[in-house]
Image (tube, rainbow, N blue to C red):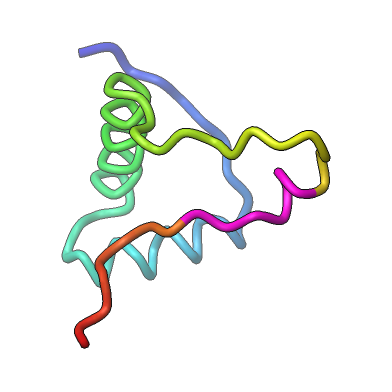
């Protein structure tokens, strides 16, 4: 497995550290998980297509319905 070196500032490290602690991982493992999930999302692409509108502002401020559906 290739080794990649990245530089992150203290604020980002603090946020990733909190997230890693929540997931019971080390900071290194958390970063690897973030990169892995990003690669999987990129590989399979997005299943939600963007809104095709004539007005660019409508595209920017339109919301997509994502996630679980609410219980009635």
Residue at (48%, 64%) from the top-left corner?
A: 15
Which residues fall within the magenta stretch? 58-64
Q: Nearer the viewer, residue 66 or 17?
A: 66
Quarter of the picture holding the C terminus: bottom left
Q: Residue furthest top?
A: 2
Q: Relative to 30, is 19 above or below? A: below
Q: Is residue 25 left or right of residue 53?
A: left
Q: Residue furthest bottom?
A: 72
The x, y position of residue 51, in whole percent, is 59, 39
The x, y position of residue 20, in whole percent, is 29, 61
Q: Nearer the viewer, residue 7 or 40?
A: 40
Residue at (31%, 61%) from the top-left corner?
A: 67
Confirm whether the magenta stretch covers residue 2. no
Q: Relative to 28, is 71 above or below? A: below
Which picture quadrant has residue 47?
Answer: top left
The x, y position of residue 42, in whole percent, is 37, 24
Q: Is residue 68 left or right of residue 47?
A: left
Which picture quadrant has residue 21?
Answer: bottom left
Q: Nearer the viewer, residue 44 or 2?
A: 44
Confirm whether the magenta stretch covers residue 63. yes
Q: Nearer the viewer, residue 69 or 38?
A: 69
């Amino acid at each position: 497995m290739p080794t990649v070196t990245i530089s992150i500032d203290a604020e980002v490290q603090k946020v990733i550290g909190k997230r890693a602690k929540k997931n019971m991982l080390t900071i290194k493992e958390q970063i690897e998980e973030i990169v892995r999930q990003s690669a999987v999302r990129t590989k399979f692409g997005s299943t939600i297509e963007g809104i095709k509108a004539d007005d660019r502002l409508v595209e920017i401020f339109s919301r997509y319905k994502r996630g679980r559906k609410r219980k009635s």
